[in-house]
Image (tube, coloured by chain):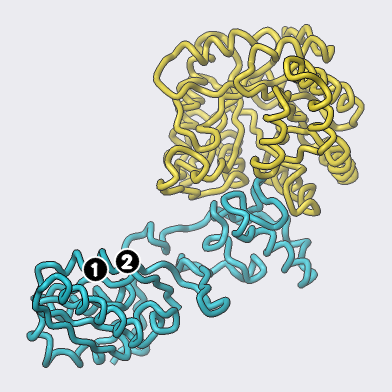
Chain colours: A yellow, B cyan
C-alpha cells in the first residue's frame, strides 16, 4: 500500500509501526477549550485524534470546527463524517473546507439513528451511504472531481477510513462487508469496541483468508470499562455491541473502587492479545469521557513512545 | 395500498367547532381495507360528532356518504348536488382524496379525518406495515425484492449498518433489519455473491427531492 497523502497516520502505518489513535467528543456548547484540553491530554501518546460527528445523535459542536482547531494547534485530526445529517452538496463542501486546512484523515460513517439523540423528531438525510461517501472522497482525491463531474481546482488529499463492526449481524456478511468497503476505496478501518476477542479473531481469520488485511490497515477498537454498570449498559443497551458475560463477571469480582483500574487492565490485556493477531495494524482507543486514561493504557500496552517521523 | 390511521376524534371535533352542517365522506378503497376511512368508520365518526354536539347543546347536522374513490373525478362528482348543504366536509380518504375532493369543491372547507401513513401491506387484521416510498426508480431487482429505501431506517443502499442485532434494527427491537432480510433472501435465492456488488449513488430526482411528480402517458390519454 503506497502512501498517497501527507497523513501522519498513513505514514506510520505504511512504515509498519502499530498506529495508535484515540477520539475526542466535542462539547455540547460553544466553548473552545474542552476539545483542546482533551487533545492535549493524549497528543503525545497517539498518532491521530478522531473527532466524533454528533455521536449518538446528540447535537454537539461540529467535528469540522474541532478538527480545524486541533490542526491549527499542530495536531493530527481524523474528521469523522456521518451521512445522517448532510446531503451530497454539504458533504462535499465540508470535505473541501477540511481539505483547505490540510486535514488529512477522514472516517466515513452512516451515523447512529437520530432517535437516540436530542432531536428524535428530526429528519435524517442519508442521501448517500457510508460506502458511497468513501467512493466520493476517493473521487475528490484521486480524480480531483466533484461528484457532479466538474474538476476540483485542488484535490482533497485525505487518507480514507471507515468503521467495521465484526459483532453486528448477520455475521456471515461481516467479512464480505469489509471487502465491499475496500472495493469502495477504504484505506484504514477502525473497528467497533472489542470485548469478545474470540469472535474478533474469528472475523480476522476470515479477513486474512481473503487477503483483506493486506488491502487496508485494520485498527482494533478498544474502550476501557469504567464500572460494572457501564459494562451492563453496553451489553444490554448499545446496538451492535458484544460484551460477553465474563467481562461483567470479572468486573463484579473486584470492589467498586477498583473496577476502573480493572477495566484499564482488561483493555491493556486485550491490546497485548490483539498484537498477536495477524492483520491488526494498530489500536483505536475510545476512552469515552475518560481521555486522561489514554496515556496510561498506551504506556502499559508497550505502545509508547510513539514513532517520530522524519 | 395507502395505509392510514384514524385521527383522534378530539382533533376532528376541534376542526369542526364553528360548523353547523358537516358531511363525513368515506372512501371505499385503501382506507376501507385498513379500517380507517370506510363506510364503517364514517358511521362511527358521524355518531361521535352527533353525540358531542348533543352533549354540548349545539345543533349540528352530520350526514354520511362513502364514495367508491376520492382520487377519481367521476366519483368525487357524485356529491356535487349535495355539497352546498354543508359548510364543512371531513374526508376519511388518504391525503390524496382530501386534496382531490378539495380541488373539485373550492368553496367548501374539506378537513382530513385520518393521518395518511405509508404505502404498505396487511400483515394481519390490525397490522399494516410499510413496503414502498415511491422513490420513482425501483431497485428491488438488486436487493432480493426487499426495499432498503422503505425498510431501512437509514435507507442504506449498501447495508447493513453496525447496529443490526439478531435480525432487528438498532432503532427498535420490534423492527426487522431490512438488510438481514435482504441477506437471508439472497441466500435463499443462492445469490449472496451479489452482496459485494456496490450499489451506485442514487438519483433522487425521481423522488420527493425532485419536486412534485407526475406520470404522463400519452399512449393512454384520450
Residue B21, picture quadrant: bottom left
Q: Position of residue B27 (x, y in %)?
A: 32, 84
Gap in Å between the C-alphas at discs 2 and 1?
7 Å
Q: For residue B86, which numbered disc appears in the image?
A: none
**Which residue corresponds to the image point at 89% horizontal and 31% vertical from the top-left?**
A277
Residue pointed to by mark 2: B8
Seen from the viewer's position, the closer of residues A6 and B100 is B100
Which residue is identified by label 1? B12
Expressed as whole percent of the image width and height from the top left, the position of residue A215 reads 79, 37
Please tell me which residue lies in front, A225 or A210: A225
Q: What element carries label 2?
A: loop
Q: Going by the image, does B3 lie left or right of A105?
A: left
Circle 2 crowding by C-alpha within 10 Å: few under 14, some 14–19, many from 20: few
Which image quarter: residue A219?
Answer: top right
Q: How many marks?
A: 2
Q: Is residue A291 among the parts visible in the rendering?
A: yes
Q: In which quarter of the image is the C terminus of chain B?
A: bottom left
* Labels 2 and 1 touching (C-beta < 8 A): yes
Q: Which residue is drawn at 61% across and 24% down?
A: A50
Up/down of A54 relative to B120, above or below? above
* Discs 2 and 1 share one subunit: yes
Q: From this view, report whether residue A164 is shown above or below residue B195.
A: above
Category of crowding for the residue at label 1, using alpha-carbon neighbours closer than 10 angstroms: few (below 14), some (14–19), many (at least 20): some
Give above or below for A187 relative to A25: below
Amino acid at each position: 500500500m503506497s502512501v498517497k497523502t501527507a497523513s501522519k497516520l498513513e505514514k506510520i502505518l505504511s512504515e509498519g509501526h502499530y498506529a495508535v489513535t484515540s477520539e475526542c467528543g466535542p462539547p455540547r456548547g460553544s466553548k473552545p477549550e474542552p476539545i483542546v484540553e482533551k487533545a492535549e491530554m493524549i497528543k503525545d501518546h497517539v498518532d491521530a485524534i478522531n473527532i466524533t460527528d454528533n455521536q449518538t445523535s446528540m447535537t454537539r459542536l461540529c467535528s469540522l470546527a474541532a478538527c480545524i482547531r486541533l490542526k491549527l494547534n499542530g495536531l493530527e485530526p481524523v474528521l469523522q463524517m456521518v451521512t445522517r445529517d448532510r446531503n451530497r452538496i454539504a458533504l462535499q463542501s465540508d470535505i473541501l473546507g477540511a481539505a483547505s486546512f490540510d486535514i488529512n484523515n477522514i472516517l466515513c460513517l452512516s451515523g447512529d439513528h437520530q432517535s437516540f439523540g436530542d432531536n428524535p423528531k428530526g429528519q435524517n438525510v442519508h442521501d448517500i451511504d457510508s460506502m458511497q461517501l468513501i467512493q466520493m472522497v476517493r473521487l475528490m482525491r484521486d480524480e480531483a472531481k466533484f461528484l457532479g463531474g466538474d474538476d476540483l481546482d485542488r484535490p482533497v488529499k485525505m487518507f480514507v477510513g471507515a468503521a467495521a463492526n465484526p459483532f453486528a449481524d448477520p455475521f456471515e456478511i461481516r467479512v464480505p462487508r469489509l471487502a465491499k468497503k475496500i472495493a469502495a476505496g477504504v484505506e484504514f478501518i477502525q473497528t467497533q469496541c472489542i470485548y469478545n476477542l474470540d469472535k474478533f479473531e474469528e472475523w480476522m481469520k476470515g479477513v486474512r483468508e481473503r487477503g483483506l488485511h493486506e488491502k487496508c490497515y485494520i485498527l482494533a477498537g478498544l474502550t476501557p470499562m469504567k464500572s460494572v454498570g457501564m459494562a451492563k449498559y453496553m451489553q444490554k443497551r448499545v446496538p451492535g455491541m458484544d460484551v460477553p458475560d465474563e467481562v461483567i463477571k470479572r468486573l463484579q469480582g473486584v470492589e467498586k473502587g477498583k473496577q476502573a483500574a480493572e477495566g484499564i487492565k482488561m483493555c491493556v490485556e486485550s491490546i497485548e492479545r490483539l498484537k498477536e493477531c495477524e492483520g491488526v495494524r494498530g489500536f483505536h482507543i475510545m476512552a469515552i469521557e475518560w481521555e486522561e486514561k489514554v496515556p496510561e493504557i498506551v504506556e502499559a500496552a508497550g505502545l509508547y513512545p510513539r514513532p517520530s517521523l522524519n | 395500498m395507502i395505509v392510514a390511521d384514524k385521527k383522534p376524534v378530539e382533533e376532528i371535533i376541534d376542526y369542526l367547532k364553528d360548523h353547523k352542517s358537516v358531511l363525513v365522506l368515506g372512501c371505499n378503497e385503501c382506507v376501507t381495507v385498513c379500517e380507517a376511512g370506510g363506510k364503517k368508520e364514517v358511521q362511527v365518526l358521524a355518531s361521535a360528532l352527533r353525540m358531542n354536539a348533543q352533549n354540548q347543546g349545539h345543533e349540528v347536522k352530520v350526514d354520511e356518504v362513502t364514495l367508491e374513490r376520492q382520487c377519481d373525478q367521476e366519483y368525487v362528482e357524485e356529491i356535487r348536488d349535495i355539497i352546498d348543504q354543508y359548510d364543512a366536509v371531513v374526508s376519511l380518504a388518504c391525503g390524496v382524496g382530501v386534496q382531490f375532493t378539495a380541488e373539485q369543491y373550492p368553496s367548501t372547507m374539506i378537513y382530513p379525518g385520518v393521518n395518511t401513513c405509508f404505502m404498505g401491506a396487511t400483515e394481519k387484521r390490525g397490522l399494516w406495515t410499510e413496503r414502498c416510498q415511491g422513490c420513482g426508480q425501483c431497485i428491488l431487482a438488486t436487493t432480493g425484492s426487499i426495499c432498503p429505501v422503505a425498510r431501512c431506517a437509514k435507507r442504506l443502499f449498501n447495508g447493513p449498518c453496525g447496529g443490526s442485532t439478531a435480525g432487528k434494527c438498532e432503532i427498535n427491537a420490534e423492527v426487522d433489519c431490512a438488510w438481514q432480510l435482504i441477506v437471508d433472501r439472497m441466500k435463499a435465492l443462492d445469490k449472496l455473491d451479489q452482496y459485494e456488488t456496490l450499489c451506485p449513488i442514487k438519483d433522487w430526482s425521481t423522488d420527493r427531492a425532485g419536486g412534485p411528480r407526475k406520470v404522463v402517458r400519452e399512449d393512454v390519454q384520450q
